[in-house]
Image (cartoon, rainbow, N blue to C red):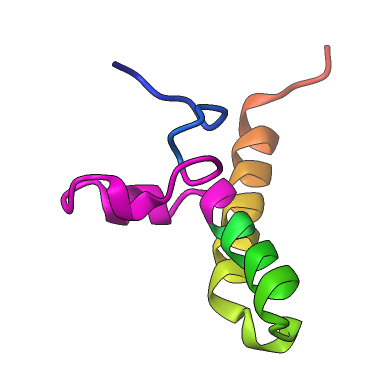
Amino acid sequence: MAMSSRSPGLGTFFSYARFPDAMQPFVIALPLTALNDALRAVMIDGTSVARLTAPLAVVAVWGVVSFGVALKIFRWR
């Protein structure tokens, strides 16, 4: 079964700890999981944004890579 980033099983509704160990690194590297972890840390634990470098870096890397791919693929005609 293929899962997209909108799939409910990618950390939004279910914890990624429930996934098989082999699949967890891939799920953790997704931007939605990183963003949800950061939001939970701020809202529930009161963590400062300065201590959220890892999840915010994952989101930033995905943004830069996606932007680069979009520049390469998309062409105005």
Query: Could you tell me which residue is drawn at 56 percent across and 68 percent down?
Result: 55
Residue situated furthest front in the rendering: 44
Judging depth in this view, the residue of 13 and 70 nearest the camera is 13
Query: Could you tell me which residue is drawn at 48 percent across and 46 percent down?
Result: 11
Query: Could you tell me which residue is drawn at 29 percent across and 48 percent down?
Result: 18
Judging depth in this view, the residue of 41 and 71 nearest the camera is 41
From which residue to which does the magenta span run? 11-33
In this picture, residue 20 sits left or right of residue 26: left
Judging depth in this view, the residue of 75 and 48 nearest the camera is 48
Q: Position of residue 40 (x, y in %)?
A: 64, 65
Residue situated furthest right in the rendering: 77
Q: Position of residue 50 (x, y in %)?
A: 71, 88
Q: Quadrant of the N terminus?
A: top left
Counting the numbered discs, the total is: 0
* Depicted 66 relative to depicted 46: above or below: above
| 24 in magenta | yes
Q: Position of residue 22 (x, y in %)?
A: 16, 50
Q: Quadrant of residue 43?
A: bottom right
| 69 in magenta | no
Query: Could you tell me which residue is drawn at 67 percent across and 34 percent down?
Result: 70
Q: Position of residue 29 (x, y in %)?
A: 42, 55
Q: Quadrant of the C terminus?
A: top right
* Depicted 48 relative to depicted 68: above or below: below
Q: Quadrant of residue 25?
A: bottom left
Judging depth in this view, the residue of 58 and 76 nearest the camera is 58
In this picture, residue 39 sits left or right of residue 6: right
